[in-house]
Image (spheres, grey):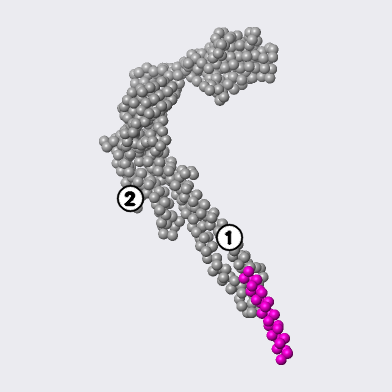
């Protein structure tokens, strides 16, 4: 409220006019003060809800880590302390021991110079980095990788040197985003200065990927300049196919052919194009390091109970921290005291964690958080019996994980779960895949747990459920035709995550909607406060003028009375 800098109150009347004005204004401002208190309380509530949302997001992150890395964590021990031939990592892989012997490792194809007895390069070399590699105004080369991808490079006077050719080859390593199905050239070019002979600068071409690809074991480069070979690098002339997809004839072929890795796993001979073998054992990656192994390396995969326990403890701690924040902010006189929305949110998350996995078979070995050693204390916080939890992991780690995660089982290997969303129903889904084309269209019927049948079509081996149905958010991976049943269950951890996501979702979540309501209400209140302040300022100015006028009038009357008195 506005105040005047100088006051000559009551000089004539003796009245404390400023005090009278302030009393009137104070009384008149009570509605505004109430609105200001309302805004302050609303802002405190908004801050408390935001803090609670932060704790919920942290809990959701811990639940996600528990499912993705906690239950799936594995330890790998090797019988070879030097790790000379093979190492392994595992995520979600089945526990067990695997005996592996490395015969050969996968190698790249390489095309490089051949040096004569005097150390001079006789192929793909030049005397200096800037020496021209072709005569005339332009030259065109074609390069074909072991993956079968062929691309052509055109050089002009601006890049007529060995580095210009290498840079042009490497520039084609990325697929063209404007061309559907485009692939990058699978060849890497480098320039090496050997420091030997009269032609020290050498161009070396190497396949980007190890192993024998769809294009074979060799890479090629050809001079396809019209009129024949014009370059000085020893690249043979050649021609490309009519569609440009390969070097049809001629050219220079790599001296070093690519080879696949060969190894024996548990007595079974195998071969892979990469030294990183990810598909021999589900969940286990073998890294082949050296060939020629005469013995075997035993790699033992086991459940990592320490990591899983730490991840579960993080969930327990996250819930307890969230609950503690809520309890503090909902105490008498606190911002969330009596807040039914906040109370309902906490109850929803608690019910999800303390419930049973939706859709889980009654015969499941573990069917609740309590069965894994999680208990609720008198104050509502959670505790973990570490011994009981680790015993459950040792007994059946998959069954233990299913208590918290989404899981599915199919009676037909041709159909498996891809993704299940928050709105996807749980239980038994019957399916009849009537048509399937590898990499193409797929069609069939899916019967939801409530008995409703839906006709679905898809592509690339994926069927997707429609929005607004019990199949919403459901993606099925299909690899053939046939009938069967897919059982889908949603663990308590996933249910809690879904509940938290519904509460904290940006823009549409419960907290976002409440905060938006608070913001809107505060905007209206602040507008009313501004209007009332303007009214009070006007009222004060008016009252001060009235009292000032009164003082002037009294002064005038006193002067008149004095004059009359002198006449008596």
Circle 2 or circle 1, nearest the eye = 1
The answer to whether 386 appears left or right of 30 in the picture is left
Return the x and y of residue 375 as percentages of the image width and height: 32, 46
Residue neighbourhood size for the residue with mark 2, other residues' Cα within 10 Å, grouped as few (<14), some (14–19), many (≥20): few
Cβ–Cβ below 8 Å for labels 2 and 1? Answer: no
Picture layout, residue 199 above or below residue 541: above
Q: Secondary structure under badge 2?
A: loop
Residue 310 % position (x, y):
39, 40
Residue at numbered disc 2: 377
At x 34% / y 28%, what residue is drawn? 431
Instruction: Tell me which secondary structure the magenta stretch mostly adopts.
Output: helix
Give the mark, 2 or 1, whose residue is nearer the N terminus.
2
Q: Residue furthest left?
A: 363
Distance from disc 2 to disc 1, alpha carbons, whole Å, reads 52 Å
The magenta-colored residue range is 542-568
Image location of residue 468, percent across then percent down: 40, 37
- Rate crowding at label 1 as few (under 14), some (14 to 19) or many (20 or more) other CA atoms within 10 Å: few
Does the stretch in magenta take in 546? Answer: yes
Q: Where on the picture, by quarter, is residue 275?
A: top left
Q: Which quarter of the picture shows residue 318? A: top left
Q: Camera-side residue: 318 or 307?
A: 318
- Circle on res. 447: none
Query: Residue shown at 39%/50% (left/top)?
Result: 344
- Quadrant of image for the C terminus: bottom right
Q: Secondary structure at mark 1?
A: helix
Quadrant where the N terminus sits is bottom right
Residue with the mark numbered 1 = 531
Image quadrant in which you'd find residue 410: top left
Q: Name which residue lies at 62% across and 65% down.
A: 538
Q: Is residue 314 visible?
A: no
* Residue 192 inside the magenta-drawn segment: no
Q: Can the viewer see residue 557 in this picture? A: yes
């Amino acid at each position: 409220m506005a105040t005047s800098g100088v006051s000559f109150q009551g000089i004539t009347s003796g009245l404390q006019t400023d005090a009278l004005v302030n009393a009137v204004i104070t009384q008149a401002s009570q509605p505004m003060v109430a609105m200001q208190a309302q805004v302050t309380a609303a802002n405190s509530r908004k801050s408390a809800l935001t803090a609670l949302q932060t704790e919920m997001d942290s809990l959701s992150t811990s639940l996600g880590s528990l499912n993705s890395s906690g239950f799936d964590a594995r330890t790998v021990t090797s019988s070879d302390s030097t790790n000379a031939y093979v190492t392994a990592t595992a995520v979600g892989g089945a526990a067990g021991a695997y005996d592996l012997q490395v015969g050969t490792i996968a190698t790249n194809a390489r095309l490089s110079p051949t040096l004569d007895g005097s150390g001079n390069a006789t192929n793909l070399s030049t005397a200096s980095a800037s020496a021209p590699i072709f005569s005339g105004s332009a030259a065109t080369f074609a390069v074909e990788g072991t993956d079968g991808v062929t691309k052509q490079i055109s050089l002009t006077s601006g890049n007529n040197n060995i580095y210009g050719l290498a840079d042009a080859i490497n520039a084609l390593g990325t697929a063209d985003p404007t061309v559907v199905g485009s692939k990058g050239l699978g060849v890497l070019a480098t320039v090496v200065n050997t420091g030997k002979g009269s032609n020290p600068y050498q161009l070396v071409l190497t396949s980007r990927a190890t192993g024998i690809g769809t294009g074979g074991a060799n890479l090629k480069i050809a001079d396809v300049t019209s009129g024949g070979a014009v370059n000085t690098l020893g690249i043979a002339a050649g021609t490309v196919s009519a569609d440009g997809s390969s070097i049809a004839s001629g050219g220079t072929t790599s001296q070093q052919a690519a080879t696949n890795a060969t190894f024996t796993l548990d007595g079974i001979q195998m071969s892979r194009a990469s030294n990183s073998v990810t598909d021999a054992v589900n969940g286990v990656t073998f890294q082949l390091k050296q060939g020629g192994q005469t013995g075997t390396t035993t790699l033992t995969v086991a459940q990592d109970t320490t990591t899983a326990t730490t991840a579960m403890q993080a969930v327990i701690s996250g819930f307890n921290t969230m609950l503690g924040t809520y309890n503090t902010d909902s105490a008498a006189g606190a911002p969330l005291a009596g807040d039914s929305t906040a109370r309902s949110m906490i109850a929803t998350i608690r019910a999800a964690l303390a419930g049973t996995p939706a859709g889980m078979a009654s015969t499941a070995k573990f069917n609740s958080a309590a069965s894994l050693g999680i208990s609720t204390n008198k104050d509502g916080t959670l505790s973990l019996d570490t011994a009981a939890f680790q015993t459950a992991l040792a007994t059946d780690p998959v069954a233990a994980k299913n208590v918290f995660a989404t899981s599915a089982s199919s009676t037909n290997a041709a159909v498996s779960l891809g993704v299940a969303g928050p709105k996807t129903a749980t239980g038994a889904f019957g399916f009849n895949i009537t048509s399937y084309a590898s990499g193409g269209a797929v069609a069939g019927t899916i019967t939801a747990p409530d008995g409703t049948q839906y006709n679905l079509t898809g592509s690339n081996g994926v069927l997707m459920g429609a929005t607004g149905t019990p199949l919403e958010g459901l993606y099925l991976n299909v690899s053939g035709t046939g009938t069967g049943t897919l059982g889908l269950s949603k663990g308590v951890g996933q249910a809690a995550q879904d509940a938290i996501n519904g509460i904290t979702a940006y823009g549409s979540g419960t907290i976002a909607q409440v905060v938006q309501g608070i913001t809107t209400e505060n905007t209206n209140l602040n507008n009313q406060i501004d209007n009332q302040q303007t009214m009070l300022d006007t009222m004060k100015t008016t009252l001060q003028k009235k009292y000032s006028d009164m003082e002037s009038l009294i002064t005038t009357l006193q002067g008149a009375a004095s004059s009359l008195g002198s006449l008596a």
